[in-house]
Image (spheres, grey):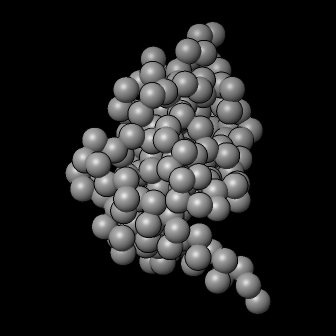
Amino acid sequence: MTTSTDAVPQGHIPPNPGLHKIVLTLNGSRREVAAAPWTTLLDLLREDLQMTGTKKGCDHGQCGACTVLVDGKRINSCLTLAAMKDGCDIRTVEGLAEGDSLHPVQQAFIDQDAFQCGYCTPGQICSAVGLIAEGRAQTDDEIRELMSGNLCRCGCYPNIVAAVRQAQADTKTTETP
């Protein structure tokens, strides 16, 4: 069981010996929450912080639907205890856009029709953002291999690879002065 701090004054965590105070930066905003030691980051994000873009798929780290960025690195939030991420910067799909401007990966997923049902899309997008930041994927085969932890039941893989390629090109274009 986790407890949100929205009902208590900012900076005040109600005393409860079973809960631990966690401070994190979520999509650019500092948040303080109290959570049981066994609470996963996924459950904290979805249930307490209302970041429902992060999906609960398999809850075993096998599908990637729960992928988020922690300090810029992509992780499966269902396999991570929230208490382990105290002090970290967490970015979910909701925090990628800059105002009305979509993140290049979000735009590429639209342009390349890289989704169908959409359930895996937030995890795919967060994973692609992390993949591009890693700078390791240079070929389509490398993209497929490094995105293999994110499953798509609809089979949009060719379009997902195309979206990653587009976003890589868009990112290089915006980085070049």
Residue 99 placement (x, y as % from top left)? 50, 74
**On the image, which quarter does residue 151 sit in?**
top left
- Residue name at image x 44 percent, y 66 percent: 162
Query: Is 152 placed above or below 79 here?
Result: below
- Which residue reaches farthest top? 17
- Residue name at image x 54 percent, y 45 percent: 145
Q: Nearer the viewer, residue 141 or 64?
A: 141
How many numbered marks does the figure carry? 0
Q: Is residue 74 left or right of residue 118?
A: right
- Residue name at image x 65 percent, y 20 percent: 20
Asked if residue 74 shows in the view, the reply is yes
Q: Nearer the viewer, residue 117 or 159?
A: 159
Tell me the quadrant of the picture where the C terminus can be found.
bottom right
Residue 154 placement (x, y as % from top left)? 25, 47
Q: Which of 5 and 119 is in front in this view?
A: 119
- Residue name at image x 52 percent, y 68 percent: 165
Residue 118 placement (x, y as % from top left)? 29, 52
